């Protein structure tokens, strides 16, 4: 496996942390493209705070049209454009 330097990418970690806090999310689902899935634990390490559980979706991830139907407080998708309502 190639050692990925996560600092070289703008994963908007601070934005994710703020969203978790503002939503008061306790259960967060992280949906990653296949290329980032091997680095899920490093990403979780950067966004994890006390009293929250972070789950990683192992299924497909094709953007806003591919939302898993699970009971969580917040779904964070990395690697996609923002979803416009």
Image (cartoon, rainbow, N blue to C red):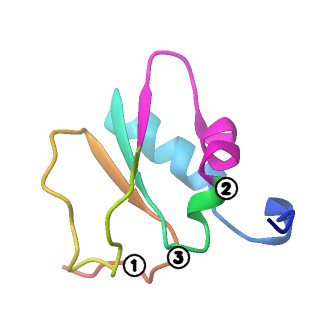
What residue would you read off at disc 2?
Answer: 39
Q: Residues within 10 Å of mark 1 (few under 14, many from 20)?
A: few
The span from disc 1 to disc 3 (Cα, nearest Å) is: 9 Å
In the rendered image, the quadrant that contains the N terminus is bottom right
Percent position (x, y) of residue 71? 15, 39
Q: Nearer the viewer, residue 3 or 16?
A: 3
Tell me if residue 25 can be seen.
no
| Residue 18 versus residue 33 in the image, above or below | above
Percent position (x, y) of residue 54? 44, 36
In the rendered image, the quadrant that contains the C terminus is bottom left
What residue would you read off at disc 3?
Answer: 79
Marked residue nearer the N-terminal end (1 or 2): 2
| Residue 33 versus residue 42 in the image, above or below | below
Residue 61: say if magenta: no
Report the magenta residues as a range: 40-55
Percent position (x, y) of residue 10? 71, 69
Q: Residues within 10 Å of mark 2 (few under 14, many from 20)?
A: some
The span from disc 2 to disc 3 (Cα, nearest Å) is: 13 Å
What residue would you read off at disc 1?
Answer: 82
Tell me if residue 39 can be seen.
yes
């Amino acid at each position: 496996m190639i050692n990925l330097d996560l600092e070289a990418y703008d994963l908007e970690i601070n934005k994710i942390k703020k969203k978790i806090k503002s939503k008061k999310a306790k259960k967060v689902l992280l949906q990653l493209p296949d290329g980032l899935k091997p680095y899920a634990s490093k990403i979780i390490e950067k966004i994890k705070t006390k009293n929250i559980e972070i789950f990683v979706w192992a299924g497909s991830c094709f953007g806003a049209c591919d939302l898993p139907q699970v009971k969580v407080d917040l779904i964070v998708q990395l690697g996609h454009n923002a979803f416009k309502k």
